Amino acid sequence: MGENLKEIGLAVIGCGVIARFRSEIARDYPGVKWLGLCDLREDFGSKLADDASADFFTTDMMELVNRPEVNAVMIVTEENRHFDPVKAAIDAGIKKLLIEKPLATEAAESAEILKLIQDNNIDASIGYTVRFNRRFLTVKERLQRGQIGDVHSVVTRAFMNRMVPIATVRKTNERHNMSPMVISGTHSLDMSLWFLEGKTPVSVYAQSVDKTLAEWGTKDSTFGVFTMDDGTIFSMNISWGLPEVWPGSVYGLEIGIVGSEGVIDIEDTHRDVIMATNNPVGHGYNPDGYEPGVERHVDFLESYPPGSYLDGQLWGANRDETLSWFNRITTGVPGPHAIAEEGHRNLLLTMAMDLSARTGEVVKLPNDLNDLIDRF
Ligand SMILES: NC(=O)c1ccc[n+]([C@@H]2O[C@H](COP(=O)([O-])OP(=O)(O)OC[C@H]3O[C@@H](n4cnc5c(N)ncnc54)[C@H](O)[C@@H]3O)[C@@H](O)[C@H]2O)c1
Protein backbone atom coordinates (compact mmCIF):
# COMPACT_ATOMS: atom_id res chain seq x y z
CA MET A 1 0.00 0.00 0.00
CA GLY A 2 3.05 2.27 -0.15
CA GLU A 3 4.29 4.75 2.41
CA ASN A 4 1.83 6.11 4.99
CA LEU A 5 1.05 9.84 4.89
CA LYS A 6 1.84 11.86 8.03
CA GLU A 7 -0.90 14.35 7.27
CA ILE A 8 -3.33 14.62 4.37
CA GLY A 9 -3.40 17.34 1.72
CA LEU A 10 -6.59 16.33 -0.09
CA ALA A 11 -7.65 17.22 -3.62
CA VAL A 12 -11.24 16.41 -4.63
CA ILE A 13 -11.92 16.44 -8.38
CA GLY A 14 -15.62 16.86 -9.17
CA CYS A 15 -17.94 18.74 -6.78
CA GLY A 16 -21.23 16.93 -7.33
CA VAL A 17 -23.47 14.88 -5.06
CA ILE A 18 -20.92 12.37 -3.77
CA ALA A 19 -18.06 14.88 -3.58
CA ARG A 20 -20.19 16.99 -1.24
CA PHE A 21 -20.43 14.12 1.26
CA ARG A 22 -16.75 13.29 1.07
CA SER A 23 -15.56 16.92 1.24
CA GLU A 24 -17.74 17.75 4.25
CA ILE A 25 -16.46 14.67 6.08
CA ALA A 26 -12.88 15.61 5.14
CA ARG A 27 -13.38 19.14 6.50
CA ASP A 28 -14.19 17.71 9.93
CA TYR A 29 -11.35 15.15 9.96
CA PRO A 30 -8.35 16.42 11.94
CA GLY A 31 -5.80 14.57 9.77
CA VAL A 32 -6.85 16.54 6.68
CA LYS A 33 -4.67 19.66 6.96
CA TRP A 34 -5.48 21.10 3.54
CA LEU A 35 -8.52 20.67 1.29
CA GLY A 36 -8.62 21.71 -2.37
CA LEU A 37 -11.57 21.28 -4.73
CA CYS A 38 -12.05 21.39 -8.49
CA ASP A 39 -15.08 21.40 -10.77
CA LEU A 40 -15.50 22.48 -14.36
CA ARG A 41 -18.60 24.38 -13.24
CA GLU A 42 -17.29 27.40 -11.35
CA ASP A 43 -20.50 28.50 -9.56
CA PHE A 44 -21.35 25.03 -8.52
CA GLY A 45 -17.85 24.08 -7.34
CA SER A 46 -17.19 27.31 -5.47
CA LYS A 47 -20.46 26.81 -3.57
CA LEU A 48 -19.16 23.47 -2.25
CA ALA A 49 -15.76 25.08 -1.57
CA ASP A 50 -17.56 27.64 0.63
CA ASP A 51 -19.78 25.05 2.33
CA ALA A 52 -16.83 22.76 3.07
CA SER A 53 -14.51 25.67 4.02
CA ALA A 54 -12.00 24.46 1.42
CA ASP A 55 -8.55 26.05 1.28
CA PHE A 56 -8.52 26.25 -2.50
CA PHE A 57 -10.82 26.00 -5.51
CA THR A 58 -10.09 25.90 -9.23
CA THR A 59 -11.79 24.81 -12.44
CA ASP A 60 -8.48 23.35 -13.68
CA MET A 61 -7.65 19.94 -12.24
CA MET A 62 -4.00 20.20 -13.35
CA GLU A 63 -3.60 23.28 -11.19
CA LEU A 64 -5.11 21.44 -8.21
CA VAL A 65 -3.18 18.16 -8.41
CA ASN A 66 0.10 20.05 -8.87
CA ARG A 67 -0.33 22.12 -5.72
CA PRO A 68 2.53 21.37 -3.29
CA GLU A 69 0.09 20.58 -0.44
CA VAL A 70 -1.65 17.73 -2.30
CA ASN A 71 -0.67 14.13 -1.47
CA ALA A 72 -4.04 12.34 -1.86
CA VAL A 73 -6.76 12.68 -4.50
CA MET A 74 -10.43 11.71 -4.68
CA ILE A 75 -11.84 11.33 -8.20
CA VAL A 76 -15.55 12.04 -7.95
CA THR A 77 -16.40 12.99 -11.53
CA GLU A 78 -19.23 11.34 -13.51
CA GLU A 79 -18.89 7.62 -14.21
CA ASN A 80 -17.53 8.13 -17.76
CA ARG A 81 -15.17 10.96 -16.75
CA HIS A 82 -12.67 9.19 -14.47
CA PHE A 83 -9.75 8.63 -16.83
CA ASP A 84 -8.35 12.17 -17.22
CA PRO A 85 -8.41 13.01 -13.49
CA VAL A 86 -6.79 9.68 -12.57
CA LYS A 87 -4.05 10.28 -15.14
CA ALA A 88 -3.56 13.87 -13.99
CA ALA A 89 -3.15 12.75 -10.36
CA ILE A 90 -0.72 9.96 -11.22
CA ASP A 91 1.31 12.25 -13.51
CA ALA A 92 1.55 14.71 -10.61
CA GLY A 93 3.17 11.95 -8.51
CA ILE A 94 0.20 11.28 -6.18
CA LYS A 95 0.26 7.76 -4.68
CA LYS A 96 -3.06 7.67 -2.79
CA LEU A 97 -6.31 7.68 -4.78
CA LEU A 98 -9.98 7.10 -4.00
CA ILE A 99 -11.80 6.63 -7.31
CA GLU A 100 -15.58 6.39 -7.52
CA LYS A 101 -17.17 3.31 -9.05
CA PRO A 102 -17.29 2.19 -11.82
CA LEU A 103 -13.57 2.46 -12.59
CA ALA A 104 -14.63 3.57 -16.12
CA THR A 105 -17.47 2.85 -18.52
CA GLU A 106 -15.21 1.76 -21.40
CA ALA A 107 -13.34 -1.51 -20.92
CA ALA A 108 -10.16 -0.38 -22.68
CA GLU A 109 -10.07 2.82 -20.62
CA SER A 110 -10.54 0.83 -17.42
CA ALA A 111 -7.65 -1.48 -18.42
CA GLU A 112 -5.48 1.58 -19.06
CA ILE A 113 -6.37 3.08 -15.67
CA LEU A 114 -5.52 -0.22 -13.96
CA LYS A 115 -2.19 -0.39 -15.78
CA LEU A 116 -1.30 3.18 -14.77
CA ILE A 117 -2.14 2.29 -11.16
CA GLN A 118 -0.08 -0.91 -11.20
CA ASP A 119 2.92 0.52 -13.09
CA ASN A 120 3.17 3.49 -10.73
CA ASN A 121 2.61 1.50 -7.53
CA ILE A 122 -0.46 3.53 -6.57
CA ASP A 123 -2.67 2.66 -3.61
CA ALA A 124 -6.10 3.10 -5.25
CA SER A 125 -9.36 2.33 -3.48
CA ILE A 126 -12.60 2.21 -5.47
CA GLY A 127 -15.83 3.65 -4.02
CA TYR A 128 -17.82 0.44 -3.47
CA THR A 129 -19.53 2.10 -0.52
CA VAL A 130 -22.11 -0.66 0.03
CA ARG A 131 -19.36 -2.87 1.52
CA PHE A 132 -19.29 -0.48 4.49
CA ASN A 133 -22.90 -1.13 5.40
CA ARG A 134 -22.46 -2.93 8.74
CA ARG A 135 -24.86 -5.75 7.98
CA PHE A 136 -22.66 -6.80 5.08
CA LEU A 137 -19.48 -6.64 7.17
CA THR A 138 -20.93 -9.13 9.65
CA VAL A 139 -22.01 -11.45 6.81
CA LYS A 140 -18.49 -11.34 5.39
CA GLU A 141 -17.07 -12.24 8.78
CA ARG A 142 -19.44 -15.23 9.21
CA LEU A 143 -18.47 -16.49 5.75
CA GLN A 144 -14.77 -16.11 6.57
CA ARG A 145 -15.34 -18.23 9.68
CA GLY A 146 -16.97 -20.91 7.51
CA GLN A 147 -20.13 -20.93 9.59
CA ILE A 148 -22.38 -22.00 6.69
CA GLY A 149 -19.89 -24.45 5.18
CA ASP A 150 -19.01 -24.35 1.50
CA VAL A 151 -21.16 -21.77 -0.33
CA HIS A 152 -22.67 -23.22 -3.53
CA SER A 153 -25.55 -20.83 -4.43
CA VAL A 154 -26.01 -17.06 -4.21
CA VAL A 155 -29.06 -15.13 -5.37
CA THR A 156 -28.95 -11.33 -5.46
CA ARG A 157 -31.82 -9.01 -6.28
CA ALA A 158 -31.36 -5.24 -6.55
CA PHE A 159 -34.41 -2.98 -7.00
CA MET A 160 -33.87 0.69 -7.79
CA ASN A 161 -36.03 3.72 -8.22
CA ARG A 162 -35.91 4.96 -11.84
CA MET A 163 -35.01 8.44 -10.57
CA VAL A 164 -31.43 7.16 -10.36
CA PRO A 165 -30.93 6.02 -13.98
CA ILE A 166 -32.77 9.02 -15.38
CA ALA A 167 -30.73 11.48 -13.30
CA THR A 168 -27.55 9.62 -14.29
CA VAL A 169 -27.99 9.13 -18.04
CA ARG A 170 -29.32 12.62 -18.63
CA LYS A 171 -25.80 13.93 -17.84
CA THR A 172 -24.29 12.41 -20.98
CA ASN A 173 -24.98 11.58 -24.61
CA GLU A 174 -22.52 8.68 -24.44
CA ARG A 175 -25.09 6.22 -23.16
CA HIS A 176 -24.07 2.97 -24.86
CA ASN A 177 -22.56 1.59 -21.64
CA MET A 178 -24.89 3.33 -19.17
CA SER A 179 -26.57 0.04 -18.38
CA PRO A 180 -28.15 -1.06 -15.09
CA MET A 181 -25.29 -3.49 -14.41
CA VAL A 182 -22.36 -1.22 -15.41
CA ILE A 183 -23.58 1.79 -13.43
CA SER A 184 -25.44 0.44 -10.40
CA GLY A 185 -25.60 -3.36 -10.39
CA THR A 186 -21.82 -3.17 -10.06
CA HIS A 187 -22.34 -2.47 -6.33
CA SER A 188 -24.25 -5.69 -5.67
CA LEU A 189 -22.05 -7.71 -8.03
CA ASP A 190 -19.00 -6.46 -6.12
CA MET A 191 -20.66 -7.32 -2.81
CA SER A 192 -21.63 -10.81 -3.96
CA LEU A 193 -18.17 -11.60 -5.35
CA TRP A 194 -16.64 -10.27 -2.13
CA PHE A 195 -18.79 -12.83 -0.29
CA LEU A 196 -17.64 -15.49 -2.78
CA GLU A 197 -13.96 -14.55 -2.44
CA GLY A 198 -11.71 -17.32 -3.79
CA LYS A 199 -14.20 -18.46 -6.45
CA THR A 200 -13.75 -17.27 -10.04
CA PRO A 201 -16.62 -16.83 -12.53
CA VAL A 202 -16.17 -18.95 -15.66
CA SER A 203 -19.37 -18.18 -17.61
CA VAL A 204 -22.43 -15.94 -17.58
CA TYR A 205 -25.82 -15.91 -19.29
CA ALA A 206 -28.03 -12.82 -18.99
CA GLN A 207 -31.18 -11.25 -20.43
CA SER A 208 -32.31 -7.60 -20.43
CA VAL A 209 -35.56 -5.73 -21.07
CA ASP A 210 -36.11 -2.07 -21.97
CA LYS A 211 -39.86 -1.41 -22.02
CA THR A 212 -39.82 1.81 -19.94
CA LEU A 213 -36.30 3.28 -20.02
CA ALA A 214 -35.54 2.76 -23.73
CA GLU A 215 -36.36 6.43 -24.36
CA TRP A 216 -33.47 7.27 -22.02
CA GLY A 217 -31.06 5.01 -23.91
CA THR A 218 -30.82 2.39 -21.17
CA LYS A 219 -32.44 -0.89 -20.04
CA ASP A 220 -34.99 -1.49 -17.27
CA SER A 221 -33.61 -4.76 -15.96
CA THR A 222 -30.84 -7.28 -16.44
CA PHE A 223 -31.03 -10.74 -14.91
CA GLY A 224 -28.15 -13.21 -15.23
CA VAL A 225 -26.54 -16.34 -13.86
CA PHE A 226 -22.79 -16.75 -13.35
CA THR A 227 -21.19 -20.16 -12.91
CA MET A 228 -18.02 -20.22 -10.82
CA ASP A 229 -14.95 -22.43 -11.32
CA ASP A 230 -16.12 -24.87 -8.58
CA GLY A 231 -19.69 -25.11 -9.94
CA THR A 232 -21.19 -22.53 -7.55
CA ILE A 233 -24.04 -20.60 -9.17
CA PHE A 234 -24.58 -16.88 -8.60
CA SER A 235 -27.77 -15.27 -9.86
CA MET A 236 -27.36 -11.50 -10.25
CA ASN A 237 -30.52 -9.52 -10.96
CA ILE A 238 -31.16 -5.81 -11.12
CA SER A 239 -34.14 -3.73 -12.08
CA TRP A 240 -33.57 0.02 -12.00
CA GLY A 241 -36.86 0.91 -13.67
CA LEU A 242 -39.15 1.04 -10.60
CA PRO A 243 -41.54 4.03 -10.75
CA GLU A 244 -40.60 7.30 -9.07
CA VAL A 245 -43.32 6.84 -6.43
CA TRP A 246 -41.73 3.57 -5.22
CA PRO A 247 -40.88 4.24 -1.55
CA GLY A 248 -37.29 3.10 -1.96
CA SER A 249 -35.60 6.35 -2.98
CA VAL A 250 -32.51 4.63 -4.39
CA TYR A 251 -31.54 1.03 -3.63
CA GLY A 252 -33.07 -2.10 -2.05
CA LEU A 253 -31.21 -5.39 -1.94
CA GLU A 254 -31.95 -8.99 -1.10
CA ILE A 255 -29.14 -11.52 -1.05
CA GLY A 256 -29.50 -15.22 -0.23
CA ILE A 257 -26.34 -17.26 0.36
CA VAL A 258 -26.68 -21.03 0.62
CA GLY A 259 -23.86 -23.22 1.88
CA SER A 260 -23.39 -26.92 2.58
CA GLU A 261 -24.16 -26.43 6.28
CA GLY A 262 -26.15 -23.24 6.50
CA VAL A 263 -27.71 -20.23 4.87
CA ILE A 264 -27.55 -16.45 5.27
CA ASP A 265 -30.58 -14.50 4.09
CA ILE A 266 -30.07 -10.73 3.86
CA GLU A 267 -33.00 -8.31 3.75
CA ASP A 268 -31.69 -4.88 2.86
CA THR A 269 -34.83 -3.44 1.27
CA HIS A 270 -35.32 -0.86 4.05
CA ARG A 271 -38.99 -1.72 4.56
CA ASP A 272 -38.34 -1.66 8.29
CA VAL A 273 -38.33 2.17 8.64
CA ILE A 274 -41.19 3.65 6.61
CA MET A 275 -42.71 7.12 6.60
CA ALA A 276 -46.06 7.94 4.97
CA THR A 277 -47.39 11.49 4.98
CA ASN A 278 -49.84 13.79 3.22
CA ASN A 279 -46.90 16.09 2.58
CA PRO A 280 -44.44 15.52 -0.30
CA VAL A 281 -41.34 13.74 1.04
CA GLY A 282 -38.90 14.91 -1.63
CA HIS A 283 -36.55 12.76 -3.64
CA GLY A 284 -33.69 10.63 -2.40
CA TYR A 285 -31.41 11.47 -5.24
CA ASN A 286 -31.22 15.10 -6.32
CA PRO A 287 -28.31 15.84 -8.60
CA ASP A 288 -28.19 19.44 -9.61
CA GLY A 289 -31.12 20.36 -11.85
CA TYR A 290 -32.97 17.02 -11.74
CA GLU A 291 -36.70 17.20 -10.98
CA PRO A 292 -38.67 13.95 -11.48
CA GLY A 293 -42.01 15.78 -11.73
CA VAL A 294 -44.00 13.52 -9.37
CA GLU A 295 -44.73 13.82 -5.69
CA ARG A 296 -43.66 11.01 -3.38
CA HIS A 297 -45.54 10.52 -0.11
CA VAL A 298 -44.08 7.27 1.20
CA ASP A 299 -40.39 6.77 1.91
CA PHE A 300 -38.23 3.84 3.03
CA LEU A 301 -36.12 6.12 5.20
CA GLU A 302 -32.81 4.30 4.97
CA SER A 303 -32.86 3.55 1.26
CA TYR A 304 -30.18 6.05 0.29
CA PRO A 305 -26.97 3.97 0.36
CA PRO A 306 -24.46 6.72 1.25
CA GLY A 307 -26.36 7.41 4.51
CA SER A 308 -28.77 9.86 6.13
CA TYR A 309 -28.38 13.55 6.99
CA LEU A 310 -28.75 15.10 10.41
CA ASP A 311 -27.74 18.68 11.21
CA GLY A 312 -25.70 18.96 8.02
CA GLN A 313 -23.75 15.74 8.65
CA LEU A 314 -24.06 12.50 6.71
CA TRP A 315 -24.22 9.32 8.80
CA GLY A 316 -23.82 5.93 7.23
CA ALA A 317 -21.74 3.86 4.85
CA ASN A 318 -20.19 6.81 2.99
CA ARG A 319 -18.87 8.29 6.25
CA ASP A 320 -17.44 4.96 7.37
CA GLU A 321 -15.84 4.43 3.98
CA THR A 322 -14.35 7.93 3.81
CA LEU A 323 -12.98 7.87 7.37
CA SER A 324 -11.64 4.37 6.86
CA TRP A 325 -9.85 5.58 3.72
CA PHE A 326 -8.20 8.39 5.71
CA ASN A 327 -7.07 5.71 8.20
CA ARG A 328 -5.83 3.50 5.38
CA ILE A 329 -3.60 6.17 3.83
CA THR A 330 -2.21 7.44 7.14
CA THR A 331 -1.85 4.20 9.16
CA GLY A 332 -1.68 1.48 6.48
CA VAL A 333 -4.64 -0.39 8.04
CA PRO A 334 -6.41 -1.60 4.87
CA GLY A 335 -10.17 -1.81 5.74
CA PRO A 336 -12.64 -3.49 3.39
CA HIS A 337 -12.07 -1.10 0.47
CA ALA A 338 -12.32 -2.50 -3.04
CA ILE A 339 -9.03 -2.21 -4.90
CA ALA A 340 -8.41 -1.26 -8.53
CA GLU A 341 -8.11 -4.87 -9.73
CA GLU A 342 -11.58 -5.57 -8.31
CA GLY A 343 -12.98 -2.40 -9.88
CA HIS A 344 -11.66 -3.44 -13.30
CA ARG A 345 -12.94 -7.01 -12.87
CA ASN A 346 -16.37 -5.68 -11.87
CA LEU A 347 -16.58 -3.53 -15.00
CA LEU A 348 -15.63 -6.43 -17.29
CA LEU A 349 -18.11 -8.81 -15.62
CA THR A 350 -20.97 -6.33 -15.79
CA MET A 351 -20.12 -5.73 -19.46
CA ALA A 352 -20.04 -9.51 -20.02
CA MET A 353 -23.63 -9.65 -18.70
CA ASP A 354 -24.61 -6.94 -21.18
CA LEU A 355 -22.79 -8.80 -23.97
CA SER A 356 -24.68 -12.01 -23.17
CA ALA A 357 -27.99 -10.15 -23.08
CA ARG A 358 -27.19 -8.51 -26.44
CA THR A 359 -26.11 -11.69 -28.23
CA GLY A 360 -28.27 -14.28 -26.47
CA GLU A 361 -25.11 -16.37 -25.87
CA VAL A 362 -23.59 -17.89 -22.78
CA VAL A 363 -20.37 -15.84 -22.49
CA LYS A 364 -17.35 -17.92 -21.48
CA LEU A 365 -15.15 -15.91 -19.15
CA PRO A 366 -11.45 -16.40 -19.92
CA ASN A 367 -8.79 -16.50 -17.15
CA ASP A 368 -7.65 -13.09 -18.36
CA LEU A 369 -10.90 -11.12 -18.66
CA ASN A 370 -9.05 -8.54 -20.79
CA ASP A 371 -9.31 -11.07 -23.64
CA LEU A 372 -13.02 -10.13 -23.82
CA ILE A 373 -12.42 -6.42 -24.38
CA ASP A 374 -12.55 -6.62 -28.18
CA ARG A 375 -16.06 -8.11 -27.95
CA PHE A 376 -17.58 -5.28 -25.91
N1 LIG B 1 -20.07 5.26 -3.92
C1 LIG B 1 -21.37 5.51 -4.03
O1 LIG B 1 -22.19 5.11 -3.19
C2 LIG B 1 -21.84 6.31 -5.19
C3 LIG B 1 -23.18 6.77 -5.23
C4 LIG B 1 -23.57 7.52 -6.33
C5 LIG B 1 -22.66 7.83 -7.33
N2 LIG B 1 -21.38 7.35 -7.25
C6 LIG B 1 -20.37 7.63 -8.29
O2 LIG B 1 -19.73 8.87 -7.97
C7 LIG B 1 -19.32 9.53 -9.18
C8 LIG B 1 -19.89 10.94 -9.18
O3 LIG B 1 -21.31 10.87 -9.11
P1 LIG B 1 -22.16 12.17 -8.70
O4 LIG B 1 -23.57 11.70 -8.61
O5 LIG B 1 -21.51 12.85 -7.57
O6 LIG B 1 -21.96 13.04 -10.04
P2 LIG B 1 -22.32 14.59 -10.28
O7 LIG B 1 -22.75 14.69 -11.70
O8 LIG B 1 -23.23 15.09 -9.20
O9 LIG B 1 -20.90 15.32 -10.10
C9 LIG B 1 -19.82 15.14 -10.98
C10 LIG B 1 -19.10 16.48 -11.10
O10 LIG B 1 -17.83 16.27 -11.74
C11 LIG B 1 -17.55 17.45 -12.48
N3 LIG B 1 -16.48 17.16 -13.46
C12 LIG B 1 -16.53 16.31 -14.52
N4 LIG B 1 -15.33 16.27 -15.15
C13 LIG B 1 -14.51 17.12 -14.47
C14 LIG B 1 -13.16 17.52 -14.61
N5 LIG B 1 -12.38 17.03 -15.60
N6 LIG B 1 -12.63 18.41 -13.74
C15 LIG B 1 -13.39 18.90 -12.73
N7 LIG B 1 -14.69 18.56 -12.54
C16 LIG B 1 -15.25 17.69 -13.39
C17 LIG B 1 -18.89 17.82 -13.10
O11 LIG B 1 -18.92 19.17 -13.51
C18 LIG B 1 -19.85 17.50 -11.94
O12 LIG B 1 -20.14 18.65 -11.16
C19 LIG B 1 -19.82 8.63 -10.32
O13 LIG B 1 -18.78 7.78 -10.73
C20 LIG B 1 -20.94 7.81 -9.68
O14 LIG B 1 -21.16 6.56 -10.29
C21 LIG B 1 -20.96 6.63 -6.19
Image (cartoon, rainbow, N blue to C red):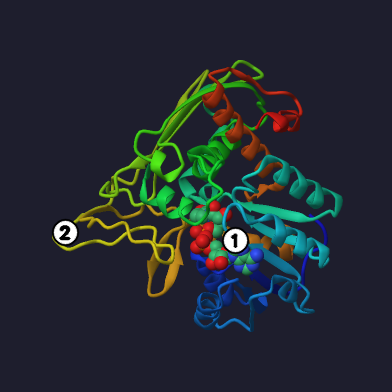
Q: Position of residue 363 (x, y in %)?
A: 62, 21
Tell me where residue 347 appears, x and y as whole percent. 63, 39
The x, y position of residue 238, in whole percent, is 44, 35
Which label lies toward us, 2 or 1?
Answer: 1
Q: Secondary structure at mark 1?
A: loop
Q: Which label is found at residue 77?
A: 1
Counting from the top left corner in percent of width and height, residue 60 is at 68, 74
* Mark 2 secondary-structure assignment: loop
Q: Residue at x 35, y 54 (%)?
A: 302
Whether pointer 2 and pointer 1 mark residues with C-beta atoms closer than 8 Å, the reply is no
Within the displayed image, which quadrant is ligand 1 positioned in?
A: bottom right
Q: Residue drawn 64% across and 77% down?
A: 35
Residue 352 shows which numbered tag?
none
- Name the N-terminal-most of marks 2 and 1: 1
- Classify residue 310 as left or right of residue 273: right
**Which residue is depicted at the point 62% across and 77% down?**
30
Asked whether residue 112 appears in the rendered view, the answer is yes
Q: Tag 1: residue type?
A: Thr
Residue carrying label 2: 277
User: How dense is the environment of label 2, judged by Cα within 10 Å: few (below 14), some, or many (20 and up)?
Assistant: few
Q: Nearer the viewer, residue 257 or 305?
A: 305
Q: Nearer the viewer, residue 309 or 165?
A: 165
Front residue (pair 151, 372): 372
State which quarter of the image contains the C terminus: top right
Q: Is mark 1 within 8 Å of ligand 1?
A: yes
